[in-house]
Amino acid sequence: MAASSVTLPPKNRQEWQQMISGEINYRYSNFVLQMQLTQVQKDIKNKKITMDDAVDRIYELCSKYVLAVQTDFKQIFKTW
């Protein structure tokens, strides 16, 4: 039962892009996620990666640390 609550929202949800663009203004409790979001924002600004690449990177990071991002994601995504 508990395993079903420890998942990630689908990658096609708009909140992923909103987190990266800064449209969602949120104080993340997960420091590594915050650092990676800042990095991909810089990379997009400097045209090193696309938004899709950034979403892929953040999603991959979160899939590795799914337990660590649950608190933040419950606030941002609400349900999934």
Image (cartoon, rainbow, N blue to C red):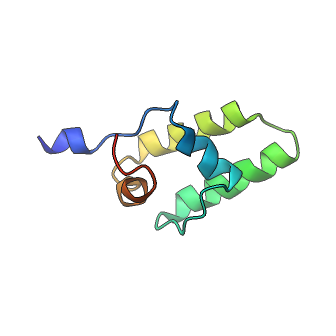
Total numbered badges shown on the rendered structure: 0
Q: Residue at x 44, y 32 (%)?
A: 10
Q: Residue furthest right?
A: 46
Give x and y (percent) for residue 68: 38, 56
Q: In front: 63, or 17?
A: 17
Nearer to us in this view, 17 or 53 = 17
Whether 50 is drawn above or below 27: the answer is: above
User: In the shown orientation, is residue 7 left or right of residue 65?
Assistant: left
| 76, 32: nearer the viewer | 76
Inspect this view and state whether residue 58 appears.
no
Quick check: 2 left or right of 63?
left
Which quadrant is home to the C terminus?
top left
Residue 57 position by quadrant: top right
User: Relative to 24, does residue 17 appear above or below in the rendering?
Assistant: above
In the figure, 34 relative to 79: above or below? below
Q: Residue at x 50, y 32 (%)?
A: 11
Inspect this view and state whether residue 4 appears.
yes
Picture quadrant where residue 15 is located? top right
- Horizontally, residue 32 falls left or right of residue 65, namely right
Q: Position of residue 13 (x, y in %)?
A: 50, 36
Q: Image height check: is 50 above or below 70? A: above
Q: Quadrant of the N terminus?
A: top left
